[in-house]
Amino acid sequence: MTGLTRRRLLATAFAAAALPVAARAQDAQDEFSYDGILPFLWDAHVVRDLVLLSDMGEEQTIRYVGRDFHSRTGLVAAARLMGAFETRQQATRYLEGLSQVDEAQFSPEAMASQMKVIEELLRTNLPLIPRTGSVQPVRLALVEPPPFVPPEDRAILARIIADTLEIHPEDLPEGEALDNSGELTELLDELLALTRDEEWNALSDRAERLLVVAVVPDRIATLRGPARPRVLYNLAVACVPLIGWTYMTARLVAGIRRNRHRFSFG
């Protein structure tokens, strides 16, 4: 798994491009072949594992950013060439099939949340698979507290989550931040405890759960003006409909680790 290189990723994409157009079209209409997507499933896990290492200094961060960018770029290119899905019916069939692939390792709830994102993309007339050139290197959250009045730990974490989802402060409704009620509040506190204890693997698991809870249509609908389609498109560029929350989980964990010194226990 760790030996998977960008050359192999691109080779997969080129192999998909070599398929006859008619065969690829028929494949999209009937049963999507997961052989072409499996290398990217594995590589997404490699990307995530890079942010779970005990030592994540500058060198490891650079490695993570580079691997994440090449992995997502290759995945988007291959998905477009293979015609992974373009309609709700194809997306539903794709996710149903993906749930049967052992390497996917996605929970039913994570799959369901992916479908919600897909439906929102379709409702907003956004492509389920973005343009290859729209994939950019990940921009990790960097929280700078206000002068002289450091915010509380939960507020810092909420800012990291919003930044990871590329939600700007001006995008939020008047007088509101992330919805800190119910299960979301409990998850924030769990993430803080795991960050304090440097339990990175457990943090990754709970981070995925937080994304499942946080990215739902009614929360996305509260974003201001052009923020909603922009946030949705950013999620698509992060390959959410294709690989689940793996890339976004890695991005969130990396952002939390990068800002650990900002917390009261840092």
Image (cartoon, rainbow, N blue to C red):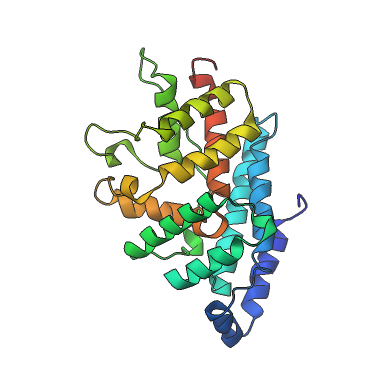
Given residues 42 and 61, the one toward you in this image is 42
Image quarter where the C terminus lies is: top right
Horizontal and vertical percent position of residue 32: 59, 73
Please indicate, yes or no, whether residue 143 appears anywhere in the rendered image.
no
The relative height of residue 65 versus residue 179 in the rendered view (above or below) is below
The relative height of residue 93 versus residue 235 in the rendered view (above or below) is below
Given residues 104 and 48, the one toward you in this image is 104
Across the whole image, how many numbered discs are drawn on residues? 0
The relative height of residue 106 versus residue 101 in the rendered view (above or below) is above
Horizontal and vertical percent position of residue 201: 65, 35
Q: Hey, which quadrant is residue 176 in on the image?
A: top left
Q: Hey, which quadrant is residue 147 in on the image?
A: top left
* Residue drawn at x 65%, y 68% as measured from the top left: 34
Check the image and name the residue furthest to the bottom.
22
* Residue drawn at x 25%, y 46% as measured from the top left: 224
Check the image and name the residue furthest to the left.
174
* Residue drawn at x 51%, y 63% as measured from the top left: 132
Horizontal and vertical percent position of residue 125: 33, 66
Q: Hey, which quadrant is residue 158 in on the image?
A: top left
Horizontal and vertical percent position of residue 223: 29, 45
* Residue drawn at x 64%, y 69% as measured from the top left: 13
Please indicate, yes or no, whether residue 198 appears anywhere in the rendered image.
yes
Q: Is residue 228 left or right of residue 12?
A: left
Given residues 181 and 24, the one toward you in this image is 181
Check the image and name the residue furthest to the top.
148
Q: Is residue 202 left or right of residue 162?
A: right
